[in-house]
């Protein structure tokens, strides 16, 4: 049991942070729609909140590589807790306005990417310390993140219905504290530091600049293609969770339905992620990537028609199941193809890429929902995602063995 304690502590932090974020993700748009009844403003807040991730993620990755992964992870989670608690604190003191909601949401988004990146860079050392296969651990890590998003939206919806949207933020804030404490107890090696020191002792030059993360990704054709794929798919998919589905369920006054659908998506993703270690040992990675892209495209189409709740949940589960292995696969590729002392910067750049495109998609989705309705907007987003997946499959780097 002691040998597995690094895995347990890292996953407690991973799960608690994911649970807190998923509660916040469902609570902020609900709070906005309660107070303004404006999907466009909900989309604007979601979009602007994504901007800090673009700017801060590479810096967070640099901090991870040069200050320390544990310090960055702990600090990021404690600051996230403070920013989430600001919602009820401001509500009790000055009262929440549209501007204050926007400012707090943006402040909170500054800290999450650094903590997320820091935990990813710990995976190889946790695998070594616990004698766990790295592929399997990547699947476990992303699986627990998925599980947190299974329970988080449902818990968030339950909290909204029972104690109200404002008080829900206290629970999320406490979860970030738990995440920080778990990492504070974690004791593992530091492959990044060892890699840098080994290079220096061998007389090799090490480049400490942030841009080395970009260079490492761009020089590797496969990682470049997969990172671009994340950017495009995130741009057309994330607005469905942050704008389209919240608006639909708020219109029919069914917060529980929203929580169930997002939980179904996350449940499928968790199963797919947990299964990655088993799948990767049995099929080629390029075959798995084809399954991910095709499965995601086929699953989102029925969701766009907004069928009855059970069918919507089933399609959401299949979409999550198809997409689930993507993140652990990408993690493994970075860990195996990039030097350890660059992991923070590379993961930081990938996180920035993930944040880069969704803001425009969220704003456009919010405007489209207000002017053309939920179903029309969802159909357009599903179509764009499907077409993008086809083009990604046709790229040369995905046709070669990797």
Image: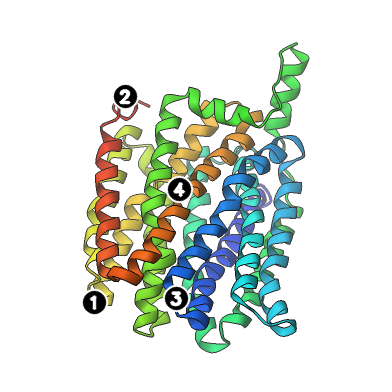
Marks 1/3: CA–CA distance: 24 Å
The outermost residue toward the bottom is 162
Check if mark 4's residue and mark 3's residue have beta carbons within 8 Å.
no
Considering only order in the chain, which callout, 3 or 1, is on the residue closer to the N terminus?
A: 3
Numbered tag placed on residue 183 in the rendering: none
Q: How busy is the neighbourhood of tag 3: few (under 14 within 10 Å), some, or many (20 plus)?
A: some
Residue positioned 49% across, 72% down in the render? 29
Considering only order in the chain, which callout, 3 or 4, is on the residue closer to the N terminus?
A: 3
Marks 4/2: CA–CA distance: 27 Å
Residue 133 visible to an observer of this rendering: no
Check if mark 4's residue and mark 2's residue have beta carbons within 8 Å.
no
Marks 2/1: CA–CA distance: 41 Å
Label 3: state its secondary structure. loop
Marks 3/2: CA–CA distance: 47 Å
Which is in the foreground here, disc 2 or disc 1? 1
**270 in relation to 314, above or below:** above
Which is in the foreground here, disc 3 or disc 2? 3
Residue designated by label 2: 400
Which is in the foreground here, disc 1 or disc 4? 4
Numbered tag placed on residue 357 in the rendering: 4
Marks 1/4: CA–CA distance: 30 Å
Residue designated by label 1: 308
Residue positioned 30% across, 50% down in the render? 385
Residue 12 coordinates in the image, percent (x, y): 62, 59
Numbered tag placed on residue 38 in the rendering: 3
Which is in the foreground here, disc 4 or disc 2? 4
Check if mark 3's residue and mark 2's residue have beta carbons within 8 Å.
no
Residue positioned 76% across, 23% down in the render? 197
């Amino acid at each position: 049991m002691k040998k597995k304690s690094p895995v347990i502590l890292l996953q407690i932090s991973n799960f608690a942070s994911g649970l807190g974020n998923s509660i916040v993700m469902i609570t902020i748009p609900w709070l906005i729609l309660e107070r303004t009844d404006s999907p466009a403003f909900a989309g604007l807040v979601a979009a602007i909140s994504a901007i800090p991730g673009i700017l801060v993620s590479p810096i967070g990755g640099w901090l991870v590589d040069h200050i320390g992964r544990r310090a960055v992870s702990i600090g990021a989670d404690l600051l996230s807790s403070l920013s989430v608690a600001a919602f009820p604190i401001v509500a009790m003191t000055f009262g929440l306005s549209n501007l204050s909601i926007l400012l707090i949401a943006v402040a909170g988004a500054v800290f999450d990417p650094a903590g997320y990146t820091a935990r990813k860079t710990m995976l190889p050392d946790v695998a070594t310390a616990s004698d766990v296969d790295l592929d399997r651990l990547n699947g476990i890590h992303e699986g627990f993140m998925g599980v947190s998003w299974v329970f988080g939206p449902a818990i968030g919806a339950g909290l909204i219905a029972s104690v109200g949207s404002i008080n829900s933020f206290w629970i999320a804030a406490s979860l970030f504290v738990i995440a920080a404490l778990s990492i504070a107890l974690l004791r593992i090696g530091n492959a990044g530091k060892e890699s840098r020191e080994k290079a220096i002792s061998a007389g090799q030059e090490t480049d400490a600049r942030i841009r080395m993360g970009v260079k490492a990704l761009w020089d590797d054709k496969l990682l470049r293609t997969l990172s671009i794929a994340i950017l495009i798919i995130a741009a057309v998919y994330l607005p469905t969770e942050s704008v389209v589905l919240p608006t639909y369920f708020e219109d029919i006054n069914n917060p529980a339905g929203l929580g169930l659908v997002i939980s179904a998506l996350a449940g499928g993703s968790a199963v797919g992620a947990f299964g990655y270690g088993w799948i990767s040992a049995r099929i080629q990675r390029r075959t798995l990537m084809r399954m991910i892209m095709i499965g995601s495209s086929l699953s989102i189409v029925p969701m766009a028609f907004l069928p009855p709740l059970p069918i919507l949940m089933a399609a959401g589960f299949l979409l999550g199941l198809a997409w689930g292995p993507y993140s652990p696969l990408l993690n493994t590729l970075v860990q195996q193809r990039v030097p350890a002392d660059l992991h923070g910067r590379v993961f930081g750049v990938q996180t920035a890429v993930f944040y880069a495109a969704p803001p425009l998609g969220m704003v456009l989705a919010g405007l489209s929902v207000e002017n053309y309705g939920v179903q029309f907007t969802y159909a357009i987003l599903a179509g764009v995602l499907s077409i993008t997946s086809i083009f990604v499959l046709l790229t040369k780097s995905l046709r070669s063995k990797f």
